[in-house]
Image (cartoon, helix red, strand yellow):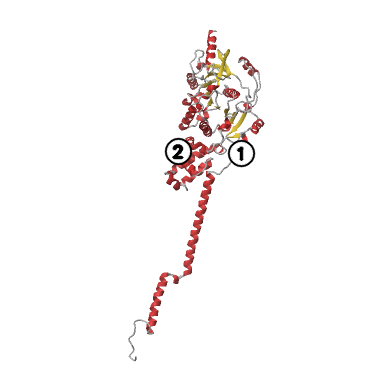
Amino acid sequence: MADQAAFLEAVKSGYSFKGEAVKIGAAMLDGQVVPGADVLMPLKTMNRHGLIAGATGTGKTKTLQVISECLSDNSVPVLLMDIKGDLSGIAAAGAANDKINERYQKLGLTYTPTAYPVDLLTLSNQKGVRLRATVSEFGPVLLSKILGLNDTQGGLVAMMFKYCDDTKLPLLDLKDFIKVLQFVSNEGKAELEKTYGKISTTSTGTILRKVVELQQQGADVFFGEKSFEVDDLMRIADDGRGMISVLRVTDLQDRPKLFSTFMLQLLAELYATCPEEGDLDKPKLVLFIDEAHLIFQEASDALLQQIETIIKLIRSKGVGIFFCTQNPMDVPAAVLGQLGLKVQHALRAFTAADRKVIKQTAENYPETNFYKTDELITQLGIGEALITMLNEKGVPTPLVHTMLIAPRSRMDVLSDSEIDGIVAKSKIAAKYNQIIDSQSAYEILTDKLNEAAEKSAEQKEAAEEEKAGKKSSKKEEGFFDNPMVKQAGRTAANVITRSLLGALGLGGRSRKKSSWF
C-alpha cells in the first residue's frame, strides 16, 4: 500500500503541467489502474516530437488515433500518414461495446462516439485531394540527395537549375528535368559549356538512370502542378477543431524511395514556409508517420542526415513529428534522441535477437523503482503502454505503465461511398484535383529544337538548290563558254585577222613609199 501511495504521488507530481494538458490514460501498478493516477499530455511540448512503438496488434495505430483526437479537440491541426489504410475511420463516429465501456469505467471517463473533421489526401490516383510538388520546389540540393548523387553529379544538377533560372525554363515535372538533361548532353552542350563549364556525358547518363529509377516507383504522379500549399494542412474546421488530414499512401508500401522523397520534401517545405515561433502554448501542426521504417529503409546517408537536421530544427517552427513503428531500433539513433514523448507498447521475445532488442529498448527509458522495464515490455496488454514525455522545462516525466483511452472515432475504415462523400465536401479538393499542364522546360526546349531543326533543314535545302543551280548553269555554258577556251579563241582570231590584213597590205608595219608617186 505504501508503494501505491508513493507511486500515486510520483505520477501526480510528474504529470502535472502548467498550461493546457489532456488526459490520455491512467497509470497502472501491478497490472491494476491506480485511481487518481491520471496520465496527462501537455500541449506545450507536443512540438518536441515523439515515438509510438510496439509489436503488431498491440495498439500502436489506435494510440496514434487517440492522440490525434485529443489534438483536434484542442484546435491543433493533424496530418496522418495512413500506410495500412486503417486510419480513415477517424472521420466517422465510433460505436460502444462492452470492452470500451469497461475501459472507460476504469479510467473514470464516459465514452462519447465522435466523428472528426477530415480531409483525405493522396499522392497517386486514389480518391482524395492530390498532393503534388514541382521539381523547382525541390531544388538542386534536395533533388541530388534524393537521387543519391555524388558531388560532381550534384554540381551538374545545380548547373542545370541555374541554366533553367537564367533562361526562364520552368522545371515542373520529371519530363522537364529529363528534357533539360538530354539537352545539356547533346544539342545544348557547347552553348552551356561556354557559360557554365565542362559537362561530363558520363555524369548526365548516371543522373538519367537514377531519375528513371525514381520514375519506376511512380514519381511522375507526384511531380507537377498544382503544388500543395502547407497552409492547407494547418486549417481549423468551422466548429473550432483542428482539421485532420489523412494521407492515404497504402500503395507506397513497396515504393519506399517515393515515400522518402515525399516526406523529405514535405518536411523541407514546412521548415522553409513556417516562420520561427519558439515555444508556443500548443503546436501549429503535428505530423504522425505510421510504419516510419519506410522512410529510413532505403535512405542514403545524405538523406538520413537531411531528415535528422530538419527534425532538430523544425521544432522551433511549431511543428511536431511522431514516428510510429514496430521496433524503436528502426529509427536512427540520432533521430531517436530528438523524440520527447515515447509510447512503448508490448514487444515480443521470440528469439535471442528479440531479447537483445528489448534490453536495449528498456535502457533507453528513464530508470524506475516501480517496474522491471525489460520484463514489463513483454507483458503489456493491448491498449497498454509504457509512457514518458517531457515537461515544460524539458525534463523527462517518470516512466509509467499506462492504460490508454480508446478512440472515440471509428476503429475501422470508411466505405467507398463514405470516402466519396468526404472528398465531395472537401474545401480544397477542387483547388488541387484539376489537371494543369503549363508550358514548361519540356515544351519550350522541344519547340526550340524543332525550330532549330526546321531552320537547319531550310538552310540545307537552300544550299542544295544553290549547288544544283550552279551545276545547271555550267552545263548550259558548254565547251566554248569556258574562259580558257574563250581566251584561246581570241588569240587565234587575232592571229588570223593580222594575217589577212597583212595579205591585203593593210596590216603590219608602214610600207615604203611607192616609186611611181
Nearer to me, 360 or 88: 88
Q: Mark 1 against mark 2, which lies toward the viewer?
A: 1
- The C terminus lies in which quarter of the figure? bottom left
In-image side of 1 versus 238 (left or right):
left
Tell me which amino acid carries mark 1: Gln
What residue appears at the point 46 percent right and 45 percent down from the top-left corner? 185
Report how far apart the C-alphas of labels 1 and 2 lie in the structure. 33 Å
Q: Which of the 4 image quarters holds residue 88? A: top right
- Residue that mark 1 sits on: 434
Residue 235 position in % (x across, y down): 59, 29
What residue appears at the point 47 percent right and 45 percent down from the top-left corner? 184
- Residue that mark 2 sits on: 154
Q: Residue furthest top?
A: 2
Residue 358 position in % (x across, y down): 50, 20
In-image side of 509 versus 161 (left or right):
left
Lower sequence index among marks 1 and 2: 2
As helix, strand or loop, the secondary structure at mark 1 comes to loop
Nearer to me, 163 or 56: 163
Around disc 2, counting alpha carbons within 10 Å, would you say few (fewer than 14), some (14 to 19), or many (20 or more)? many
Around disc 1, counting alpha carbons within 10 Å, would you say few (fewer than 14), some (14 to 19), or many (20 or more)? few
Tell me which amino acid carries mark 2: Gly
Q: Residue furthest bottom?
A: 516
In-image side of 277 versus 125 (left or right):
left
In-image side of 98 versus 298 (left or right):
right
Residue 431 position in % (x across, y down): 61, 36
Give me the disc on residue 275.
none
As helix, strand or loop, the secondary structure at mark 2 comes to helix
Instruction: Kindly tell me whether residue 347 is visible in this rendering.
Output: no
Residue 394 position in % (x across, y down): 49, 20
Q: Which of the 4 image quarters holds residue 85? A: top right
